[in-house]
Image (cartoon, grey):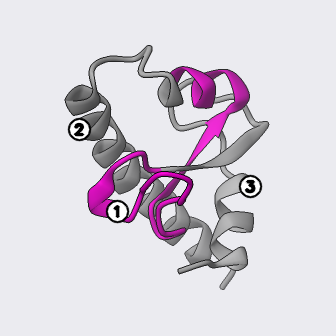
Amino acid sequence: MRSPKRLAAVRLLPCIRCGNPDSQAAHSNSAKHGKGRGIKADDAYTVPLCHSCHSQFDQYKLGSRAESEKLFESWLVKTELMLSKSDEECF
């Protein structure tokens, strides 16, 4: 599923790893989130990562595949909290 609204909101958040304010919406690299050969994971499984952290994550320079999946899961939880907090601030 694609969600331009979610991608835009994620890009407004700082990098979940280093805090860089210039972030990208990084998709999960896990098949359980819909990732496949040439297929991006569902947009619901995106976190804010700067270009450098995104590149390191995609190249498994932050750990093994299993370690990267675990790291992504923790980032996803934090991202959801950050998004809900930014929604609350709008009201």
Q: Residue at x 54, y 65 (%)?
A: 83
Q: How many marks?
A: 3
- Left or right of 51? Residue 63 is left
Q: Is residue 89 above or below residue 27?
A: below
Tell me the residue that label 2 is attached to: 70
- Give the crowd class for mark 2: few <14, some 14-19, many >=20 residues within 10 Å: few
Residue type of the residue flagged with mark 1: His
In the picture, residue 60 is in which quadrant? top left
Q: Which callout, 3 or 1, points to the residue nearer the camera?
A: 1
What is the C-alpha distance between the residues marked 3 and 1?
22 Å
Element at badge 3? Answer: loop
What is the C-alpha distance between the residues marked 2 and 3?
24 Å
Q: Which callout, 2 or 3, points to the residue nearer the camera?
A: 2
Tell me, for residue 12, which label it has, or none. 3
Residue span colored magenta: 28-56
Q: Residue at x 29, y 48 (%)?
A: 73
Q: Are marks 2 and 1 in contact (CB under 8 Å)?
A: no
- Asked if the magenta segment contains residue 37, the reply would be yes
Tell me, for residue 33, which label it has, or none. 1
- Give the crowd class for mark 3: few <14, some 14-19, many >=20 residues within 10 Å: some
Q: Is residue 30 above or below residue 16?
A: below
- Asked if the magenta segment contains residue 31, the reply would be yes
> In front: 77, or 43?
43
Q: Position of residue 51 (x, y in %)?
A: 72, 29
Q: Which callout, 2 or 1, points to the residue nearer the camera?
A: 1
Residue type of the residue flagged with mark 2: Lys
